[in-house]
Image: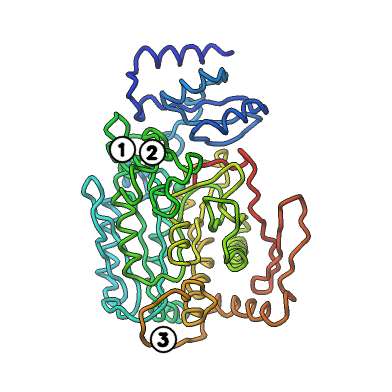
Amino acid sequence: MKKTILFVTTFCLVFFPLEAQDYWNTEIISVEKDQETVEKLTEMDLDLLMEWNNRVYIIVGFNDFLKLQKENIPYTLETFNFSPYKQKEVSLQGGINGRFHSYAELERDLLALQDSYSHIARVIDLGDSLEGRNIYALKISDNVYQDEQEAELFFVGCHHAREWISVEVSFLLGKYLVENYATNSQIKDLVDQCEIWIVPLLNPDGLEYSIHFYRYWRKNRRDNGDGSFGVDPNRNYSYNWGLDDEGSSPFPSSVVYRGLSPFSEPETQVIRNLFAQRNFQAVISYHSYSQVILYPWGYTNQPTTEQQLLDQIAADMSGLIQSVNGNIYEYGQAAADLYLTNGGMIDWTFGTYNIPSYTLELPPIDQAHGGFFNAEEDIQPIFNENLPAMLYLIDWSVQNFSSGINPSRRRERRSGPIANMKDKNQYGREARARREDKDTTQNSKLKTNEPKTSGVKNKTIDIGNKAINVRKYSPMFIKEHKRK
Ligand SMILES: [Zn+2]
């Protein structure tokens, strides 16, 4: 056992009161990854960071130290190896968050988009956060002030405060669509035929806290009344909320605390209210990190009734992303044997509304490549590689708006005229060609390879004239144990 262990423990016990839970007594530690420890860790509710060099890295607060002590798990203090603010020189102009948006900067930039492109962009205040910040949606469509009978899509970023890149990728989608509308007929066609709703920053209080106080902050800033702060918004949706204590936690100090009741938090309430008023056809919730595309269920490893469709769309998106920079985003069902979630957004949007819904974990692939820290110069390339998948999903929604292919269309709908279908988008054309081919010729283009290893099924899909091997999400304990 190392000296640091004893020191840290003593230090914590002496100086920090029991109820203290905030950033100033949070540390990063590592423990050896042996079978016995792994078994103990699975039973504990810990914020696991990564596995490296046969050690498991964990973010721990005061109570976690107690748990480790109780289980006699030796650990090494690693905090000094992870210095958030020093990792990258940030540009002075942007302040501590550099080119990443703060709440105020995002507000300014969203309103600027509305000013410059008022015929297709509209900023809507969905409601207030706990600390009184506005939760904004950017709606993009032709006749943006009308509610037309068109396919509607929903993109959301930043359920989790420390996942800064998810704000950027969602915002850049809006910016790209409005800036290219006048000059790119494919974009114009898409925007004219649907209504795109983007909420780049669902958890503004958490983001501000992450910028100014503690970079690793994840939850919102609910005062839980016991000295701890924060409810995990992505455990607070009502579908199978609190089903078990594995997929979410009843303990306020936990990083995956689900709150006192479903939809107890303003962040999830605004989503609930928006979905009650809209007819969304597809959903992507952006998170970071680990480069995976996940679909429901998260609460169980049983498949949904739409497994094949959800899997195919995910495989197509994975291939489109990979075609840009070669980066592999694995895809598959969210629930892993040892990693369940309940009260998550995509289980709710799918379980309640049958909407094809995805959690997309943005780069990097692991903690060793930066974890929650993305370099400022990577913001644009990460968006660029995600754009074709975004456009594909938009086009897919437009094309299937009136069909029964989209399961969300099988539920009760408002009656009204169906939008005219146009056939211009290149992503759409290729995607449609693949779909039609598949439908009529039974997998002539879509080759499903034999599983290479047990439980892992990869596919080859054609993107344009390139054949791309897409990789099935193969969750193993601690391979990728970041909290979704
Ligand atoms: Zn997340």
The disc label shown at residue 372, or none: none
CA distance separating discs 1 and 2: 10 Å
User: Is 224 placed left or right of 419 in the picture?
Assistant: left
Q: Which residue is mark 2?
A: 217
Graded by Cα atoms within 10 Å as few (under 14), some (14 to 19) or many (20 or more), the crowding at tag 3 reads few
Q: Which residue is mark 3?
A: 418
Decide which of 472, 111 is in the foreground and name it: 472
Q: Residue furthest left?
A: 132
Determine the residue positioned at 41% across, 85% down.
419
For the residue with label 2, is its CB less than 8 Å from the closest atom of ligand 1? no
Graded by Cα atoms within 10 Å as few (under 14), some (14 to 19) or many (20 or more), the crowding at tag 2 reads many
Q: Position of residue 416 (x, y in %)?
A: 36, 85
Residue type, mark 2 in image = Trp
Residue type, mark 3 in image = Ile
**Given contact means CB atoms under 8 Å apart, are the residues at marks 1 and 3 in contact?**
no
SS state under label 3: loop
Q: Which of pointers 1 and 3 lies earlier in the amino acid sequence?
A: 1
CA distance separating discs 2 and 3: 44 Å
Position of the N terminus by quadrant: top right
Mark 2 vs mark 3, foreground winner is 3
CA distance separating discs 1 and 3: 48 Å
Decide which of 251, 94 is in the foreground and name it: 251
For the residue with label 1, is its CB less than 8 Å from the closest atom of ligand 1? no
SS state under label 1: helix
Q: Which residue is mark 1?
A: 212
Q: Position of residue 366 (x, y in %)?
A: 57, 43
